[in-house]
Image (spheres, helix red, strand yellow):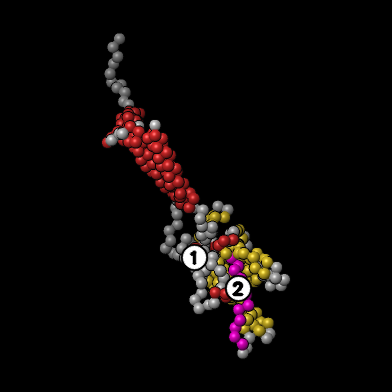
């Protein structure tokens, strides 16, 4: 009795482990909040060509000083720390967009006035929508609260990017910042509906591109990945079935060799069943001839 209870507990643990392994791919798919690959109204956009650290700035004249607002951002990943810059003059870890304001004054050293984490992975909450005229995408990435420059009230920050479709990519431009939303405009091929996945020239810009013939059906990447995922799950299920079944037969009945196979009699009959199915199909499609030259005895 004790041995049977121990075997039951071990079998339960193995079943739980197999369930975790089968569900692991599904859980991992939700780890990344924003990977620059989005789908809007059934259209897929690959914004990874916009990834990488970028820096843009604007200058405001406030005599006798000059204020320089510099935005460092990477919409597809987190910004690294700047070498040689005091830790207090940098945004915290996990920042995707950092706004630094520097006060410049003649005969004085430059002074960092503010460092604002405009967009952070911990509170990113990405949102996006299509622009109709001109064609493009509106992308918003959020950050934590920061004191408003006019009343010092903690205000949630946001990076609002207007991505406009263009035949050639251009540099992003600093549009405005009101203490809450920092707006950037960027013309890029990745914002076009028919943009190539690598962010290069559009198909219409190349003379040697092949145009699909009429009647050709586009290959669905989602369908291919779905079929692959199904067969992966099926393979893991079969491995778990035979492994746990063999362990159960060994621990319960002391089976060895071929007797370890779970439901051995069924699997032994599988080749015969397959042969019967093939024979039935062949007999169904075999042409039938009628001998019209013969006679029937009465």
Residue 293: percent from the left, percent from the top?
Answer: 28, 20
Q: Secondary structure at mark 1?
A: helix
- The quarter of the image holding the N terminus is top left
**Is residue 68 positioned above or below 145 on the image?**
below
Above or below residue 58? Residue 203 is above
Mark 2 surroundings: few (<14), some (14-19) or many (≥20) residues within 10 A: many
CA gap between label 1 and label 2 equals 27 Å
Residue 173 shown left or right of residue 296 in the figure? right
Point out the frontmost of discs 1 and 2. Answer: 2
Quarter of the image that includes the C terminus: top left
Residue 272, quarter of picture: top left
The residue that appears at 56% across and 69% down in the rendered structure is 92
Point out the residue furthest to the right here: 151
Q: Nearer the viewer, residue 2 or 271?
A: 2
Whichever of callouts 1 and 2 sits on the residue coming sooner in the sequence is 1
- Which secondary structure dominates the residues rendered in magenta? strand
In reply to whether residue 41 is colored magenta, the answer given is no
Image quadrant where residue 249 sits: top left
Which residue shows up at 71% across the image and 72% down it? Answer: 150
- Residue 183: x %, y % from top left: 62, 68
Taking the magenta stretch, the answer to whether it contains residue 114 is yes
Q: Residue at x 28, y 12 (%)?
A: 297
Give the percent coordinates (x, y) of residue 192: 54, 61
**Residue 159 quadrant:** bottom right
Residue furthest to the front: 2
Residue range of the region highlighted in magenta in the rendering: 108-119
The circle drawn on residue 49 is 1
Where does the image place residue 253, in percent across and percent down from the top left? 33, 32
Left or right: where 202 falls relative to 283: right
Rendered image: mark on residue 115: 2
User: Would you say residue 175 is visible in this rendering?
Assistant: yes
């Amino acid at each position: 009795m004790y041995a049977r209870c121990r075997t039951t507990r071990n079998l339960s643990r193995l079943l739980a482990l197999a369930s975790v392994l089968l569900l692991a791919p599904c859980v991992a798919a939700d780890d990344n909040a924003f990977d620059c690959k989005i789908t809007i109204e059934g259209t897929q956009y690959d914004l990874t060509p916009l990834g990488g650290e970028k820096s843009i700035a604007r200058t405001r004249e406030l005599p006798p000083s000059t204020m320089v607002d510099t935005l460092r951002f990477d919409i597809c990943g987190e910004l690294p720390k700047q070498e040689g810059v005091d830790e207090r003059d940098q945004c915290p870890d996990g920042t995707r967009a950092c706004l630094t304001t520097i006060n410049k004054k003649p005969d004085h050293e430059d002074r960092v006035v503010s460092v604002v984490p405009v967009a952070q992975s911990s509170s990113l909450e990405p949102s996006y929508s299509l622009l109709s005229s001109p064609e493009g995408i509106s992308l918003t990435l959020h950050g934590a609260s920061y004191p408003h420059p006019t009343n010092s009230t903690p205000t949630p920050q946001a990076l609002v990017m207007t991505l406009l479709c263009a035949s050639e990519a251009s540099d992003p431009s600093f549009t405005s910042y009101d203490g809450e939303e920092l707006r950037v405009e960027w013309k890029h091929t990745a914002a076009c509906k028919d943009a190539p996945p690598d962010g290069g020239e559009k198909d219409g810009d190349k003379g040697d591109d092949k145009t699909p013939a009429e009647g050709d059906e586009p290959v669905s990447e989602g369908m291919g990945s779905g079929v692959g995922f199904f067969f992966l799950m099926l393979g893991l299920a079969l491995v778990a079935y035979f492994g746990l079944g063999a362990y159960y037969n060994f621990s319960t009945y002391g089976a060895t060799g071929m007797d370890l196979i779970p439901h051995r009699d069924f699997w032994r009959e599988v080749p015969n069943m397959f042969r019967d199915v093939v024979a039935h199909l062949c007999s169904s499609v075999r042409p039938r001839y009628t001998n019209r030259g013969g006679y029937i005895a009465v």
